[in-house]
Structure formats: C-alpha cells, structure tokens
Amino acid sequence: MHTGLKPPRLAGMAIRSYRGRTPHPALDDLDRAIIGCLQADGRRPYARIGRELSVPEATVRQRAERLVERGVIQIVGVTNPLAMGFGQPALIGMRVEPGRIEEIAERIAGLPEVTYLVVVAGRFDLLCEVVCEDNEHLLSVLTDRLAAIEGIRSTETMVELRFVKESYQWGTR
C-alpha cells in the first residue's frame, strides 16, 4: 500500500462517521489557525502553536480539545502499511440489496482489513479500501469474509498499484 509516494495510513481502528454531525460547525479564525498548525504537524506542542499564533498555550489546548470533542479533527498516529507487512491494498466497489446499505456497511466496517468505507452514489453503493498482506490475504477477504455477508449483490476489486497522492490537509476553507 505504501510505495514511498503515499503518506502512511491511520494507526489502529478509528471508525469515524459524519452522520449526525453538524455539516459546517462554527469555526473562527483561531480554530482554523490551530487546525492548520496541527495538520502541518500533529505533534506540535500547544505552547509552540500558542507562540506562533500569539495566544496562551491554555487557549490552544482548550480549543484543540473542543475541536476533537466536536468531531472537527482527529489527532492520530499514522503508519506505513508496507513497513508493517501489508503489501496488497485494493479498492472494492459493491452493489448491495436496496434498503440494506446501513446494515451491510456496518458489517463491512467491522472487518479488520477495511481502512476506509463510504456510501456512494453512482455505479456502486459502497466503496471500501482494504489493506491486505498479499494476494492470498486479499483473496480470502473477497471469497471468505465479503462473500459471507448476505445482501452484497456484486463486487468489483481494483488493486492499487501505485499511489500518486493522498493528503490529510484539506485546509480550513
């Protein structure tokens, strides 16, 4: 998965859902500045951010904690899957039975190989990324784990060959 061109993925299993969250939480200029600093370096000390933004460290700490609590940001460790022995990433598009998207998505999200899962419009109903050790592991995910989930009508697997870009820095528009 990580070919040297791609920043590493999230460590652990942080399942994140935007359902029920405010689509545009009120952010002021200071919130945006703190987010920008943390996107550049998530380990940057609050004291240093405070100095850079000319505000007290306590203000940065309180604001950052509030941003995490509100689901605006996550501060996580990121790993290199190749360095950890996961050399076969793939994207899997799935068509599912009508009315069962949420149920099926929940089952898929529980698979340890799934690093990304979204409900989409278009050719597929669901799109996920899996990170597997090798082709045999990927085959097992497809033929044993996904095939066992009732309601998946079809899948299309796209093996990831090389990453050109992946970024966690969307800015703070």
Image (cartoon, grey):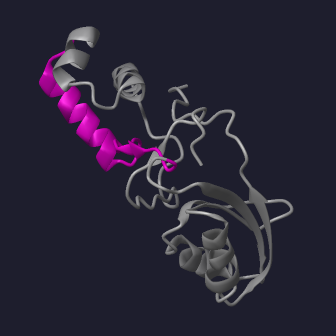
Q: Horizontal and vertical percent for residue 30?
A: 34, 21
In this rendered view, identify the residue nearer to me: 42 or 66: 42
- Give the vertical position of 33 relative to 51 (above or below): below
In this rendered view, identify the residue nearer to me: 61 or 115: 115
Residue 153: quadrant of the picture: bottom right
- Give the vertical position of 106 relative to 166 (above or below): below
- State the extent of the magenta-drawn residues as a range: 55-82
Q: Horizontal and vertical percent for residue 3?
A: 60, 39
Q: Please state if 3 lies on the left or on the right of 72 as rendered.
A: right
> Can residue 29 be spotted in the picture?
yes
Q: Please state if 65 lies on the left or on the right of 90 as rendered.
A: left
Q: Horizontal and vertical percent for residue 162?
A: 70, 41
Q: Please state if 124 lies on the left or on the right of 90 as rendered.
A: right
- Give the vertical position of 87 relative to 150 (above or below): above
In this rendered view, identify the residue nearer to me: 129 or 153: 129
Quick check: is 17 in the magenta stretch? no
> Can residue 54 be spotted in the picture?
no
Q: Residue at x 51, y 56 (%)?
A: 18
Q: Residue at x 52, y 61 (%)?
A: 19
Quick check: is 65 in the magenta stretch? yes
* Label total for image: 0
In this rendered view, identify the residue nearer to me: 170 or 26: 170
Q: Please state if 67 lies on the left or on the right of 110 as rendered.
A: left
Q: Residue at x 28, y 12 (%)?
A: 53
Residue 74: quadrant of the picture: top left
Q: Horizontal and vertical percent for residue 8?
A: 49, 41
Residue sitting farthest toward the right: 123
- Give the vertical position of 30 relative to 101 (above or below): above
Which quarter shows the C terminus? top right
